[in-house]
Image (tube, rainbow, N blue to C red):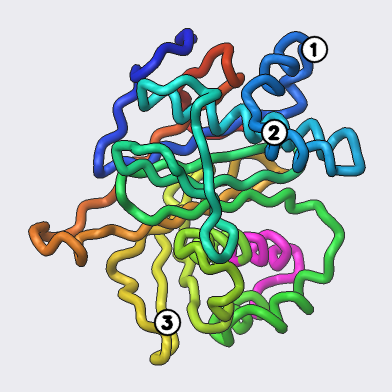
Amino acid sequence: MDKIKQNQIVLSDSEVHLWFVKPQDCLDPALLESYKALLTKEETTKQQRYIFEKDRHDALITRAFVRHLLSCYMDLPPSDWRFSKGEQGKPELINPTMALRFNISHTKHLIICALTLNHDVGCDVEHIDRKSDVLAIADRFFSKIETKELFSLPESEQRQRFFDYWTLKESYIKAWGQGLAIPLKDFSFHIGRAASNDCNNNIRLSFVPEREDNADLWQSWLFYPGPQHRIALSVKNIADLKGDRGPLEPYRVRFFESTPLVNFKEVEAINS
């Protein structure tokens, strides 16, 4: 396991780095105090607004986690990072950087953060045992293509596929940074057979005619870190902005497990 040092991770233009932390493993009182010291006054105020201690804890870990991992790429102390929010609330970096783009998601027992260079990126993690009427939600928000496929499955498989679609759709709109300003029915994910038990990248996008986007520029993944969680990742290639690239190459996804300010390690897959 590698000790944290500045600038020790290299992120290439063709990679996505997906970091994760388990907040229930970060309980040392002294370490939590060091996390609190990283936050700005505004961040501390927001963190303290949560009613339940668990939510305050997760918010603290999330902010320390993001500051810590960003400092693994840039020569900037974790306490010096400053953030703003886009029109729809997507966090962005204020500090001059090497074009780092990132996105955060959290759920029960798992926090994730995806990073790229230049490319729009979105991620989502969900705890799939939460109580909800998934078929009613799908009928209201999913596209006709997705709903038809979902309802055609055996009942025993429908809940799992619902969260496949839900996390993918969340990852797409989060990559755009426009939230639900993008109608969820305006785009469809087509999920093919997975090549492994922990990942599926046999996924493609399609759009209604009114949606101005190019499905060929997007790559998406589903990850299965454990029976309780589903993770989706979507990245848009900026080749259309550069105009100097040939055929698009698949991104390489690398995984990093972290204890903020203590250590991290690169792993083969996320395990929750």
Q: Is residue 268 left or right of residue 212?
A: right
Query: SS class of the residue under badge 3?
Result: strand
For discs 1 and 3, the disc positioned in front in the rendered view: 1
Residue type, label 1: Pro
Mark 3 sits on what residue?
207
Residue name at image x 70 percent, y 67 percent = 158
The tag earlier along the polypeptide, 2 or 1, is 1
Q: Residues within 10 Å of mark 1 (few under 14, many from 20)?
A: few
For discs 3 and 2, the disc positioned in front in the rendered view: 2
Q: Residues within 10 Å of mark 2 (few under 14, many from 20)?
A: few
Please identify the quarter of the rendering in which residue 260 is found: top right
Residue name at image x 15 percent, y 60 percent = 242
The tag earlier along the polypeptide, 3 or 2, is 2
Do the residues bearing badges 3 and 2 touch, measured as CB atoms within 8 Å?
no
Mark 1 sits on what residue?
29
Residue range of the region highlighted in magenta in the rendering: 152-165
Q: Residue furthest bottom?
A: 209
Q: Is residue 267 left or right of residue 33?
A: left
Query: SS class of the residue under badge 1?
Result: helix
Mark 2 sits on what residue?
41
Q: How far apart are marks 3 and 2 (CA)?
A: 43 Å
Tell me: residue 247, above or below residue 251. Answer: below
Please identify the quarter of the rendering in which residue 218 is found: bottom left
Q: Is the magenta stretch mostly helix, strand or loop?
A: helix
The tag earlier along the polypeptide, 1 or 3, is 1
Residue type, label 2: Lys
Q: In this view, does 229 lie to the left or right of 79?
A: right
Tell me: residue 137, above or below residue 84. Answer: below
Tell me: residue 205, above or below residue 123. Answer: below
